[in-house]
Image (tube, rainbow, N blue to C red):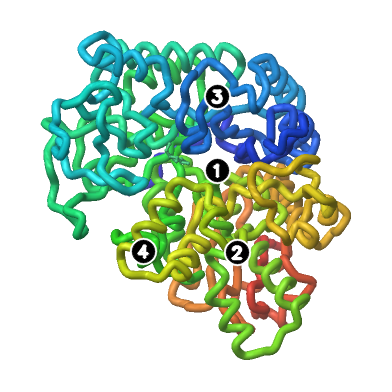
Amino acid sequence: MERDDAYIRTGKWWHDKIIYEIYPKSFMDTNGDGIGDLGGVIEKLDYLQDLGVDILWICPCYQSPFIDQGYDISDYYKIDPVFGTNAQMEELLRKARERGMDVILDLVVNHCSSEHFWFREACRDPQGKYGKYFYIMDAGEDELPTNWRSYFGGPVWSPLPGNPGKKYLHVFHEKQPDLNWENAELRRDIFSMMKWWLDKGVRGFRIDAIMNIKKPFPLRNYNPDREDGMVEMETVIGQTRGIEQFLSEMKREVLDPYDAFTVAEVCGEREEDLPLLMGREGFFSSMFDFREMTLGMSDKGWYDRKPATLRQYRDMCYAAQKAFNPYGFQTNVLENHDSPRCGDRFLQEAMHEITGKNTLTKDEKQALAEKGKKMLAVLYFFLHGIPCIYQGQEIGMENMPLERFEDIDDVSALGEYGCAIRAGLTREEALSVVQQFSRDNSRTPMQWNDLEGSGFSTAEPWMRINPNYVLINEKQQESDGGSVLSFYKKMISLRKNPAYRNTFVYGSFTPVCENENDLMAYRRTGEADILVLANISGQIVKVPIDPSFCRVLLNNTDAFILEGEGTVCLEPFQAVVLEKITL
Ligand code: NOJ
């Protein structure tokens, strides 16, 4: 498919933006209760402005019982007191704007919390108005209306509290009942709530789990994919049609009139649906490219999941660019609050290759890991699309060591632990599976400095702080020109440099040396001609290139790279950005 250049060049306000994801519970605590808060986000606005990011995505901070860390909302109009007040949210919107940044909120409308007024009313009177806001079915004690398995494990149907003989649908946790989007009244309520936030100055939304809002009718069983006789939700949703009606209504009634920016969480999208989802007439401004995040995943569960390699990462990036670029601007991520940290995820195989051949000191290993994190950053940051940085990624935060079952917080990790045990793993093995893939890995408190509490809080933090905060922290990296943080700042200013901005935002993308196993390389061509080149292997690689790519715009090491005319020599994990100079 040809690129839709006419659309791509329409110059929407968000095309050249960089998103920064804030997980407020773990960002910065200002009231000394061990939990991050909006005051903390406000306090760090200068830091974010200095970093150079433009759109702040704030993960759910609405009133919630926090069964799924705020993705279970009990009042869409109210900031949870643990985070602060609505007035503080307004202060945050204003102060971000004063610094040239916009705020988008998380929109979680596939489900609410079982403590939401709507659901409590539905339990009180399942035949009444609010009963119709949910999917409630007659079903005996041992009966399940369908054999669907929830994303967090177990059946999607649970007994409706206080109503023997009735069950309700929840594709996530049982405390997250699914909202019935077939009901026009419910849709109206949701759209009013979105407008209410947009009127306050929110510039758009990150839209949670949105493809789940349409259910297949009549509800039915699918072929089971595990011994439990159930089928995963991805299969059910993958075969469901007809979501257009809801999304076009949302676009027409809410998003377009506000020129809002939206980035949707869509997993396992069908390529033929991309024009519907993003682009000229798409329902959303952008959607996440999650393809790299799903590498190594298995239908059986985390215990069967394989670590991802850099080569797989590269191939998946190329495939994703090919699929998305014709339509518009996907949002590129390396990390988020649902994934392990990127160094732990993508560098391990190549690190083993290197450490297997050479004996490295602890410091040398750390330096290599840092180089690898910077390389990953270069590789995703200059792709076509909108870069999104997850808090802590810019200082190279790492996965959290996990020694005891009691330290697991993530609901999905608890489900996966059980699944691993049922598959015959020992407790130690199951724990090590959770350690690798748990969402807790990215949810540990921000490491602002090397003092007790890592500068995050003066109280006992709600979640354990990664003990490596003494080595990896923002304060120390701020004054170190060679740190991961300083490197992110350089990348951001390069992307925004007026001489290159149009090329990075609107230029074409072409993979280079596709058959070269040890390299990931691509060209961005527009007003300037740029080559991004990285050695993704554990050995030195020499690459013949067009000698006119001789201006080095970025290099993640001090090593010299040009070896005579037309040959570039790259250390393991070295990444460079080169510009073509025409004389
Ligand atoms: C996706 C969110 O990113 C995740 O954290 C959450 O558990 C589910 N959606 C359910 O809302």
Q: Earlier in the sequence, mark 3 or mark 2?
A: 3
Residue behind mark 4: 421
Labels 1, 3: front one: 3
Q: Earlier in the sequence, mark 1 or mark 2?
A: 2
Residue 84 spot, x, y in % from top left? 67, 23
Label placed on residue 386? 1
The answer for how far apart the CA atoms under marks 3 and 4 are is 35 Å
Please rate how many residues cluster around mark 3, counting C-alpha atoms within 10 Å: few if below 14, some from 14 to 19, many from 20. many
Residue 327 spot, x, y in % from top left? 39, 41
Q: Earlier in the sequence, mark 1 or mark 4?
A: 1
Taking depth in this image into account, of 336 and 251 the one nearest to the observer is 336
Residue at 41% of width from left, 15% of height from top? 117
Dot 1 and dot 4 residues touching (CB under 8 Å): no
Labels 1, 4: front one: 4
Residue at 35% of width from left, 19% of height from top? 119
The answer for how far apart the CA atoms under marks 1 and 2 are is 21 Å
The answer for how far apart the CA atoms under marks 3 and 2 are is 31 Å
Image-based side of 172 in relation to 142, left or right: right
**Amino acid of disc 4:** Ile
- Image-quadrant location for residue 571: bottom right
Image-based side of 308 in relation to 457, left or right: left
The answer for how far apart the CA atoms under marks 1 and 4 are is 40 Å
Residue at 80% of width from left, 40% of height from top? 458
Residue 90 spot, x, y in % from top left? 67, 17
Q: Please indicate, yes or no, whether residue 544 appears anywhere in the rendered image.
A: no
**Amino acid of disc 1:** Ile
**Amino acid of disc 3:** Tyr
Residue behind mark 3: 62
Label placed on residue 544? none
Q: Earlier in the sequence, mark 1 or mark 3?
A: 3
The local secondary structure at tag 3 comes to strand
Residue behind mark 2: 343
